[in-house]
Image: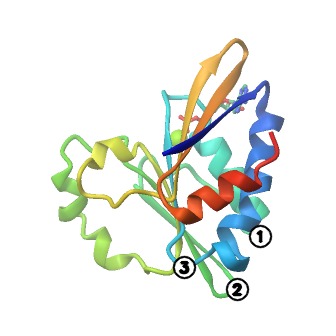
Amino acid sequence: LCTLTLHLPDEAATESLARQLAPLVSGGQTGPAGACIHLQGDLGAGKTAFTRALLRECGVTGRIKSPSYALLESYKVFNLYFYHLDFYRFSDSREWLDAGFRDLLREDAVVLIEWPERAEGLLPPPDLLISLAYADDGRDATLTAYTARGQTWLNAIVP
Ligand code: ADP
Ligand code: MG
């Protein structure tokens, strides 16, 4: 697995990473059919902030809420669907199956998942895992590619 670690000194740096990934994830040869990013990190690490910035850059307008209560927020930009999921409140991975989300999700959508480890074993590997950790006043982001497409994205990122 290929990884890249970046220091993100402030939220603007997090937004800049999202801005770089947005066109890769949502268009061209490397997306969008089934593109998936998993986001890990403690509460407040910036998973939602990153996702919000990415969705904005992809053309989502209006309010972008954290899905921590609803579990799922969906967006549509022209013919492209985006799903933002948060499994923080899952106590049991079976809830993912019970919730019936799998049938609800389109396979050609761009999917962003916070707390994927709470649905361990039920999710396919993502194209890219972004792990965010507190580092001084900013964050360290470790990006790991699990697919050839994710690897292509990693190669395109300018630190
Ligand atoms: P999570 O979804 O991981 O629980 P949020 O995105 O809700 O976290 O909150 C992240 C918080 O950290 C926000 O207050 C945001 O302004 C801030 N933040 C985001 N990225 C950075 C960064 N690189 N450095 C410092 N603060 C950041
Ligand atoms: Mg969040």
Residue 12 pos. (x, y %) = 83, 37
Secondary structure, mark 3, is loop
In the rendered structure, are the residues bearing label 2 and label 3 in contact, judged by CB atoms less than 8 Å apart? no
Quadrant of the image occupied by residue 99 = bottom left
Q: Is residue 34 visible?
A: yes
Q: Is residue 16 above or below residue 105?
A: above
Disc number lying in front (2 or 3): 3
Q: Amino acid at mark 2?
A: Phe
Scheme by which the image is coloured: rainbow
Residue 70 pos. (x, y %) = 41, 56
The answer for how far apart the CA atoms under marks 2 and 3 are is 14 Å
Residue 1 appears left or right of 120:
right
The answer for how far apart the CA atoms under marks 3 and 1 are is 17 Å
Q: Is residue 51 above or below residue 62?
A: above
Disc number lying in front (3 or 1): 3
Q: Which mark is residue 143?
A: none
Lower position in the chain sequence, tag 2 or tag 3: 3
Residue annotated with mark 1: 59
Q: Amino acid at mark 1?
A: Gly
- Viewer-side residue, 5 vs 72: 5
Q: Which mark is residue 78?
A: 2
The answer for how far apart the CA atoms under marks 2 and 1 are is 9 Å
Quadrant of the image occupied by residue 72 = bottom left
> Ligand 1 shows up in which quadrant of the image?
top right
Secondary structure, mark 2, is loop
Q: Amino acid at mark 3?
A: Ala
Q: Residue at x 77, y 70 (%)?
A: 59
In the rendered structure, are the residues bearing label 2 and label 1 in contact, judged by CB atoms less than 8 Å apart? yes
Residue annotated with mark 3: 33
